[in-house]
Image: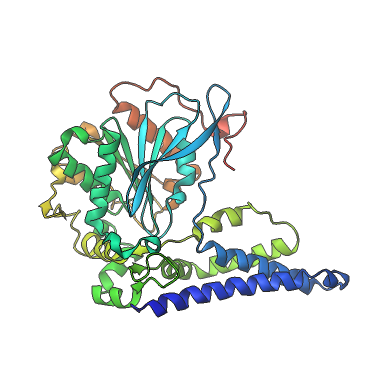
Amino acid sequence: MRYMVTYDLMEASRNMNQWFGATALSMASYPMFSMVPNPAFQWMAAWGEVTERTFQRMVVKPDWGIESITGQDGRDHLIKIETVVEKPFGDLIHFDVQGRDEMDRRVLLVAPMSGHYATLLRSTVKSLLPDCEVYVTDWHNARDIPVSSGKFDIEDYTLYLMDFMRALGSDLHVIAICQPAPLTLAATAYLAELDPDAQPRSLTLIGGPIDPSAAPTEVTDFGHRVTMGQLEETMIQRVGFKYKGVGRMVYPGLLQLASFMSMNAERHGKAFINQISRVAQGEASDRDPHNKFYDEYLAVMDMPAEFYLSTVERIFKAGEIASNEFVVAGHKVDIGAITRVAVKTVEGGKDDISAPGQCVAALDLLTGLPDDMKASYIEPEAGHYGIFAGRSWRNNIRPLVLDFIDANSEAPARRARTAPKKARKSRKIAAE
């Protein structure tokens, strides 16, 4: 599998399916066929439209689509996304709300590098913007990074997080979502040892695999079942000639997407059939629920091979974070060195990826942190996605996270918190 021709064949297959969809749409939409009362042409055009859009989205980075928010002054404030720190494998970006004073709550959202872009956190960012200054780790697609930029594994990821925290200063609250939770915990502990003044005030870990073996799932079982040699031979490919990262070893996003889709093939198949029916009947729109979800879900990015392999080997198989044996740049990081950063864990009761028990295990590792600076919460009905997006996040988890931030700030936030959307009858936040 580790050949450029394999990567290029996969891209060619995607491109061909996109072309098939575009061709079917163009042919079935030919004006002459409108004179023929045959619904087959409508269905052919609908199939082509859905197929073309599906395969096109797989290689397009979604836009954040957050143009403005309504402030407490009743005015719409434009959003400007600015780069604070620029690095080869990822940037630190800031959502600057134009015309608004800087908020007291300064939040760093650590986005996953797990096959999707940081825009997966769009709704999380939108929900925090009215009350916080929001910064996000915006990871780059490995296929676009030249080989000359070097490697990027979980140690490099941890060092990136440390640099981002240093750049923002200690008056900061970090929220790590899903996959980066163990590495964010390690980065905070490393800062506690090397640069205590750069530590954030609080750390919230949401649905992360701190100790994957604490509550096994299909994901953890897979990690233990396969060998590293099998993974390297079957999952790793070299970027083809079309992209700047030609020759770089990656875990392709298209390959991971195929794995995601196969896990719920029946549900995804039904969703696409229903969407074709809606398009044929003129009931679909560009931003209907199906397109909003799949435009993001299908937009995948390649991961550096060394990052993917080291995550499986060291986080899932060896459990280096869970056993407090994680090493960064030759230095053994001691999680117990965290003594003044308040830590909260959030889990979903129906999370089938990072099951309840995996994330809260972080609190047992914090041997140097007083118990009154530790907290945990389980949202009973939330799945993996629901703990950082959707109704569970908006109505239950987000208020608790903001309370935790305020409780561990130097002083209470000056500005009142924005009321939950369902309790307000004023204009909703603009997001298009």
What colour scheme does the image use?
rainbow
Give the vertical position of 190 relative to 247 (above or below).
above
List the single residue furthest toward the left.
Answer: 331
Quadrant in which the N terminus appears: bottom left
Residue 71, percent from left and from top: 53, 27
Q: Can see residue 394?
A: no
Residue 290, percent from left and from top: 60, 57
Quadrant of res 309: bottom left
Quadrant in which the C terminus appears: top right
Taking the spot 32% from the left edge, 50% from the top edge, the residue there is 87
Query: Would residue 305 appear left or right of 41 to someone viewing this image?
Result: left
Query: Would residue 429 appear left or right of 156 to someone viewing this image?
Result: right
List the single residue furthest toward the right.
Answer: 35
Give whichever of 422, 188 is nearer the camera. 188
How many dots with numbers?
Answer: 0
Query: Would residue 194 appear left or right of 353 to someone viewing this image?
Result: left
Residue 379, percent from left and from top: 40, 44
Taking the spot 21% from the left edge, 61% from the top edge, the residue there is 314
Give the vertical position of 138 relative to 428 (above or below).
below
Q: Can see residue 130?
A: yes
Give whichever of 383, 204 is nearer the camera. 204
Quadrant of res 303: bottom left
Residue 198, percent from left and from top: 21, 35
Give the vertical position of 208 relative to 221 (above or below).
above
Give whichever of 184, 383 is nearer the camera. 184
Query: Would residue 191 appear left or right of 218 to someone viewing this image?
Result: left
